[in-house]
Every structure is written in structure tokens, then in C-alpha cells.
Image (cartoon, helix red, strand yellow):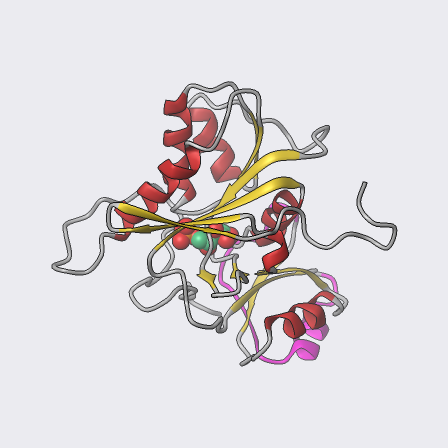
Amino acid sequence: MASAPNHGAPNHGAPNHGAPNHGAPNHGAPDLEREKEVAAVAAAALVENGMTVGLGTGSTVAHLLPALARRRVSVRCVATSPRTQDAARALGLHVEPFGDIERFDMTIDGADQVSPEGWLVKGGGGAHTREKVVAIAADRFVVIADSTKPVPRLRPPVPLELLAFGLAATMHRLGPVRRRDVPLSPDGGVIADYEGPFDDPAILAAWLAATPGVVGHGLFPPELVSTVLVGRGEEVERIDLSGSAGPSGPAGRS
Ligand code: 5RP
């Protein structure tokens, strides 16, 4: 069984997917919680009255929720995890099931790694399957991150969600995969990490997506990403990408 994996750059440490943690200052190192907060506040400022908003999962999103609640805009939200749903509702945000909503005006979520090309590794909190569904349904997918998340190149682990049926066979086929010692996803999936080396995320993403038994993987292509907001000290670096909704189907997107 794996312990909590480190999906981030050096200093990221074990992901903190709980409430914001404003601990004691750590002598010269960036205050990552503050960087997450400034990125989250900048993202909340993009949300306008009447929008439908997808809410991601994780410690950066934990800063987004109060920032969004403070805006006092009227928005319809869908959460990618029970913990985001509970936290958002506790702050008075209107969270609906992902039933009738076909499109979101905006989805806002964190990331474990961001490559220079805009590829993401997500899923440190194991919510990557739902997060990708909500990201791809959005007109704008905004990523919020502290300054350790941009990396020169992506590296393992890549989070996976696997079908429980045939798990041993699927893991055998995938090779270097480690099951995480965490509960099943809300959809009954087994959370694991692909730990093999890779050069081209597109090739790995295509292979994982084509492997039966893989429900979802944590590689998000740049075509999905509209904007990355990176907290750097008290400043926010904004990186705009062309993405809005990912690849279209064989008949194109309507
Ligand atoms: C959860 C995710 C998170 O967005 C990602 O792990 C980043 O988390 P954090 O904001 O806590 O650093 O993908 O599945």
C-alpha cells in the first residue's frame, strides 16, 4: 500500500486536501498557503453573477470557496467531491447535483503539476475523474496553483482511478502501478498511481485512456485549460492558454 504520494514539485510535500493551514512561517521558503489563497482570490474575482461554476477539490480550492462566498454573487455550483460540496454548502454557496447542468461558464480547480505547455497532472486528492468531467464541461477551465506547481516537465506519479472489477489484471497490464491506501472514490473506483517514467504526456494519456479497466487518469491536456493563475508571494502570475473544452467527438462539438 502506498502512503500519501507527493504529486508536486520539491517542497510540496504530502498534499493537504483539508482546510487551509496557515502555520508558522518557514524562514525564507514561500508561504504556499498564502500563494494558494492569492491565486484562489484572483479566480473568485473572475466569477460573475448568474454563472454556473464547477468547483474542484483540494487545499487550493479550500481557499477558493470562502473567497467565492465573500463575493456574494448568485451562482449555481457543482462540486467534484463530497468534501468540496460540504465545505461550499457550509459557506452558503448553492451546490447542485451534476444532473441537469450541461455546461458550466467556468470551472476552477487546483493541480499537482503544470507543464510549460499547459499539461496538468491532477488527482492528488483522488478526485481526478470527476474533475475532468467538470473541467471539460466548462467554457473556461481556470487552474489555481502555488508557485511549486509549475514544473519544467511532468513526472510520475500520475493518479489513476481503476475499475474494481478485474483490478489485479488491470494493474498487471499497466505495470508500475501502486494502489493508494485511501477509500474508494464516490463512484466506487480504486485510486492508484502510475509510477512509470514517461517522456510524452500525450502518449501516456492515450495509452491509459485506451486501457480497459482505467476509469480515469490525472493527465489533463492543454486544450482543456483556459487560464492558470499561479500565486507567487503576494502576486498572481496569469498564464492564458487557448483551451476551453478539450477535444471534440467524431461529429465535432455543437
Ligand atoms: C484533487 C486534485 C487537486 O486539485 C490537486 O491534487 C491539487 O491539490 P492541492 O490544491 O491540495 O495542492 O487534483 O484530486
Q: Residue furthest left?
A: 27
Q: Could you say where residue 100 lies in the image, as x and y percent from the top left?
A: 73, 28
- The residue at 67%/41% (across/down) is 137
- Is 20 left, or right, of 194 in this rendering? left
Residue 189, visible in the rendered structure: yes
Q: Quadrant location of the C terminus?
A: top right
**Which residue: 48% across, 24% down?**
93
Specify whether residue 56 is in view: no
> Which quadrant of the view contains residue 79?
top right
Q: Magenta span has 45?
A: no
What residue do we see at 42% from left, 33% from top? 44
**Percent position of residue 25, x then y:** 14, 52
How far across and down, in percent of the image, does residue 235 sit?
Answer: 28, 46
Res 41 → quadrant: top left
Q: In the displayed image of the protein, which residue is found farthest to the right?
A: 251
Please state which of residues 174 and 232 is positioned toward the viewer in this rendering: 232
Check the image and report above or below for 244 versus 123.
Answer: above
Q: Tell me if residue 147 comes above or below residue 69 in the rendering.
A: below
Residue 250 left/right relative to 173: right
Q: Which residues are magenta?
A: 165-187
- As for residue 166 lying within the magenta part, the answer is yes
Which residue sits at x=43%, y=42%? Answer: 61
Task: Using the rendered view, name the quadrant where residue 69 is placed.
Answer: top left
Query: At which x and y percent is residue 213?
Result: 73, 65
Callout count: 0
Relative depth, front residue between 240 and 166: 240
Front residue (pair 250, 197)? 250
